[in-house]
Image (cartoon, helix red, strand yellow):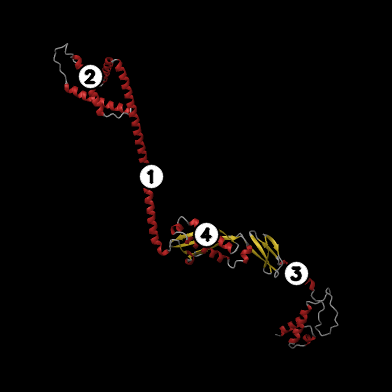
């Protein structure tokens, strides 16, 4: 304790009282002396702390005494204060200079300076940084947790779905972002919920779950941007990504059964359509072929009829000129046609009286085979010329010609 008192006397007290008196110092005297020393820090004429009167001469600022120089201190303090106004704006960021809280300018990337605090302050905001907001779920190191209050939504056909999506955004106006936003993430999440619920409420459940996911994301992005621009938040929505869309967990099993039934229906429709696509062209082709064959048969019949009519006309003209010659020629042509395709047995009864043995059974069989070959050749020739004359007509024609020939021969013999 005694050492502490001596130290205080050496630092703060220069009066003889502190040097000659071993007792405790007077507190009033000590505080008075301390006050005088503080006053001397900011004056070039320090007060006399030893009570010698006010006739002491002013102290020279450059003398070798222990008095503090005021001007260098002010210069150093001013330089330090001015140096606090330097700041650096990184690439992709913008600096907003505030003078007593009012926006004065927006600075570009690079080293910058502003009037130091408390006159001006600078806020550096990363404008190009992409920020992400999760709606309906939260990702963490331990996994993903659901936020049913955000994800459950009502569709236009009065069904409930569990919809989760992520929103990414950056800034397009740092002034609006700083002055018109109290909580940027909360603003984006609120606009996202408002937009997605409006769009889902106008859509059907199947459209939201399957074919309309991309369209809903695009519409949500546009509506969110309109809402944020209306409030001048300075936020730019870059993308809206649908993470998960499904029915609520309580009805997931029933919904899966309904989906399977719908898939079976679509599969059966596709199979029926495939069968129809296979049968209909075949039927169409068959119909076209039959029509073409009918047209060809029609043309062949017409041409054959025209040919027969023309031939008959020509024969008639020849018959009118020479009836006997024409009849003989027709008879000979008929005999030539008949005899060239049948077996012939010629017996001369006038020149011989011998009994002849005729193997009639063999002749009959041979004749039957010959007639059959004749019929086959007639059908083949008929098909070759696209003629549809029946076998019965050919046989009847041959029979009639044979009968006519034999009758004519009998008449000539008689």
Upstream in sequence: badge 4 or badge 1:
4
| Mark 2 vs 1: CB contact within 8 A | no
Secondary element at image label 1: helix
Residue at the extreme top of the image, as rendered = 351
Upstream in sequence: badge 3 or badge 4:
3
Label 1: which residue? 277
Upstream in sequence: badge 3 or badge 1:
3
Label 4: which residue? 220
Q: Quadrant of residue 14?
A: bottom right
- Distance Cα–Cα, label 4 vs label 1: 41 Å
Label 2: which residue? 405
- Distance Cα–Cα, label 4 vs label 2: 102 Å
Tell us which disc is closer to us: 2 or 1: 2
Q: Quadrant of residue 44?
A: bottom right
Q: Residues within 10 Å of mark 4 (few under 14, many from 20)?
A: many
Give the number of the disc on residue 262. Answer: none
**Residue 114: percent from left, percent from top:** 71, 65
| Mark 3 vs 4: CB contact within 8 A | no
**Residue 277: percent from left, percent from top:** 38, 44
| Mark 4 vs 2: CB contact within 8 A | no
- Distance Cα–Cα, label 2 vs label 1: 61 Å
Q: Is residue 160 left or right of residue 170?
A: left
Give me the residue at 21% from left, 25% from top.
368
Q: Residues within 10 Å of mark 1 (few under 14, many from 20)?
A: few
Upstream in sequence: badge 3 or badge 2:
3
Upstream in sequence: badge 2 or badge 1:
1
**Quarter of the figure that contains the N terminus:** bottom right
Label 3: which residue? 78
């Amino acid at each position: 304790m005694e050492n502490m008192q001596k130290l205080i006397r050496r630092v703060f007290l220069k009066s003889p009282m502190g040097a000659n008196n071993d007792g405790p110092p007077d507190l009033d005297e000590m505080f008075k002396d301390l006050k005088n020393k503080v006053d001397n820090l900011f004056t070039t004429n320090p007060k006399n702390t030893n009570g010698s009167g006010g006739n002491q001469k002013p102290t020279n600022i450059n003398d070798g005494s222990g008095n503090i120089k005021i001007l260098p201190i002010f210069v150093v303090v001013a330089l330090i204060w001015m140096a606090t106004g330097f700041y650096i704006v990184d690439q992709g960021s913008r600096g907003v200079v505030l003078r007593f809280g009012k926006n004065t300018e927006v600075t570009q990337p690079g080293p910058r300076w502003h009037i130091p605090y408390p006159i001006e302050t600078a806020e550096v905001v990363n404008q190009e940084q992409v920020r992400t907001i999760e709606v309906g779920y939260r990702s963490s190191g331990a996994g993903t947790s659901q936020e049913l209050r955000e994800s459950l939504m009502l569709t236009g056909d009065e069904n409930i779905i569990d919809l989760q999506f992520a929103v990414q955004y950056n800034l397009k106006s740092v002034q609006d972002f700083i002055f018109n936003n109290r909580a940027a993430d909360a603003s984006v999440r609120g606009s996202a919920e408002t937009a997605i619920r409006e769009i889902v409420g106008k859509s059907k459940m199947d459209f939201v779950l399957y074919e309309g996911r991309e369209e809903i994301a695009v519409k949500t992005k546009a509506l969110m941007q309109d809402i944020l621009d209306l409030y001048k938040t300075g936020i730019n929505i870059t993308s809206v990504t649908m993470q998960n869309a499904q029915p609520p967990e309580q009805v997931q099993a029933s919904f899966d059964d309904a989906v399977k039934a719908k898939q079976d229906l679509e599969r059966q429709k596709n199979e029926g359509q495939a069968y129809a696509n296979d049968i209909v062209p075949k039927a169409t082709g068959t119909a076209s072929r039959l029509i073409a064959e009918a047209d060809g048969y029609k043309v062949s019949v017409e041409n054959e009829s025209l040919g027969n009519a023309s031939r008959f006309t020509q024969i008639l003209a020849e018959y009118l000129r020479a009836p006997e010659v024409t009849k003989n020629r027709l008879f000979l042509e008929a005999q030539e046609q008949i005899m060239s395709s049948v077996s012939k047995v010629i017996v001369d009864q006038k020149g011989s009286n011998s009994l002849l043995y005729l193997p009639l059974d063999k002749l009959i069989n041979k004749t039957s085979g010959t007639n059959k070959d004749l019929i086959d050749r007639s059908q083949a020739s008929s098909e070759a010329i696209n003629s549809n004359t029946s076998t019965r007509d050919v046989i009847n024609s041959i029979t009639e010609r044979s009968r006519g020939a034999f009758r004519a021969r009998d008449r000539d013999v008689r």
